[in-house]
Amino acid sequence: MSRPIEGIIPVMLTPFDEDNRIDYGGLERLIEWYLAQGADALFAVAQSSEMQFLSLEERAALGRFVVQRVAGRVPVVVSGHVSDDPHGQVQELTAAADTGADAVVLVSNHLDPHAKGTETFLGNLKWLLEKLPKDVPLGLYECPAPYRRLLSDAELSACLDTGRFALLKDVSCHLPTVQRRVKMAEGSTLAVVNANAAIAYDAMKSGSRGFTGVFTNFHPDLYKWLRVSGAQYPELAEEVNNFLVITAVSESMGYPALAKLYHQRLGTFKSMRCRAVTYDIREKFWALDEVLDKIMAGTQAMRQKIAALPKAA
C-alpha cells in the first residue's frame, strides 16, 4: 500500500457542457477547488460523478484526467463499477486500474446484484479478485444505487483477510455499525470512512478516518476543520456540526444537480447540466435559490468564526 487513503475525500461531480459532453475545463477547476479546500484524497467516477450515466470510454477518460491533473498531490481513487455481468465488471475495473489511480473501488451491490447473500457475494468477490491486477489497492463502496447493499461482518472480515483493501466507504448511516467496523479494521490496511453527514463528526470521533459524503461538494473545509481541530474547540465544533447536519438535508432537493448549481454560483462550472437529474430542480423545489443563499451564507459565517480563533503560539 503506497499511502493511506483517508481524511476528507470528496465524491467528485462531473460537469457537462450544454451539448451534454464532459466539460474538462470545469472539471479542472473543480479539482483545484477541492484541493484548495483541504481535500485529503479524491473519489472520481463515483455515484456523485453520475457513473451510471457515463459510457465506459467516458468513465476511463474521466478517471485518467483526474489522476493526471492531481499529479500525485493527493491520492485518487476511481470506481465506475456499474455492471452486474462479471465479465463487464472485469472490463470496467481494469479500465479504472489503467487510469493510474491509487485504488480501484468495488461497489458492493454489484457483487450480489440479486441480494442472494454472503455466499454469492464472496464467490463473486473471489472470482473478481483473481482477474484484477494484484498490485492495485482496492476499495469497497456500499453505493445506494441500484440498492444499498451493506456488508455483513463476515463479508468485511473476509475482505480484510485478503490484505488488498485500502478503503471502505461506509454507507450504513449507523454510528454503532461504524464503530464496530472501525474496531474490526484495527491493525489492517483498510480505512473505514463514513459517508453520512448526520453522524459525520461522531463517526470521526469514534475512529472513522475521515468523511466522504456528498456535502464534500459544498464545504469540505468545514469537515476538515472538525476532523483536525474540532476537539480543541468543542463549543464551536458543536455549532459547525449542527450547521453541517441541517444543511445536508437539502441533498434531497435534486442532488447532484443541486451541487452543480452551487458550483455554477461559485464560478467552477459554466453549466448545471445533469444526466442523473433531468427535471428542473428550481421548478420542483420552490425557493431552492433561497436555500442555497442560506447554505452559502452559513458556510461563510462558519469560516469566519474559525478564522477568528486564536492562533497557536
Image (cartoon, rainbow, N blue to C red):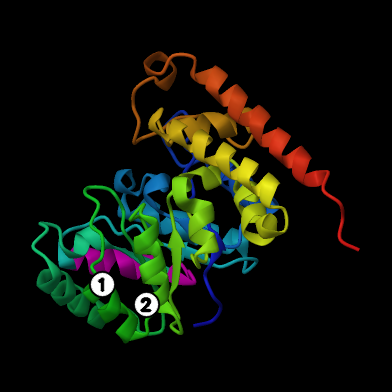
- The answer to which image quadrant residue 296 occupies is top right
Q: Image height check: is 308 above or below 150?
A: above
- Residue at 63% in and 43% down: 240
Q: In the image, what residue type sits under mark 1? A: Asp
Q: Image height check: is 272 above or below 99?
A: above
Q: Nearer the viewer, residue 291 or 238?
A: 238
**Counting residues from the N terminus, which is met first, the one under dot 2 or under dot 1?**
1
The residue labelled by disc 2 is: 184
- Residues marked 2 and 1 touching at CB (< 8 Å): yes
- The answer to which image quadrant residue 73 occupies is bottom right
The residue labelled by disc 1 is: 153
**Residue range (magenta):** 87-103
Residue 117 on image: x %, y %: 11, 65
- Direction from residue 84 to residue 313 in the image, left or right: right
Q: Image height check: is 26 above or below 9?
A: above
- Residue at 39% in and 19% down: 280
* Residue 102 lies in the magenta stretch: yes
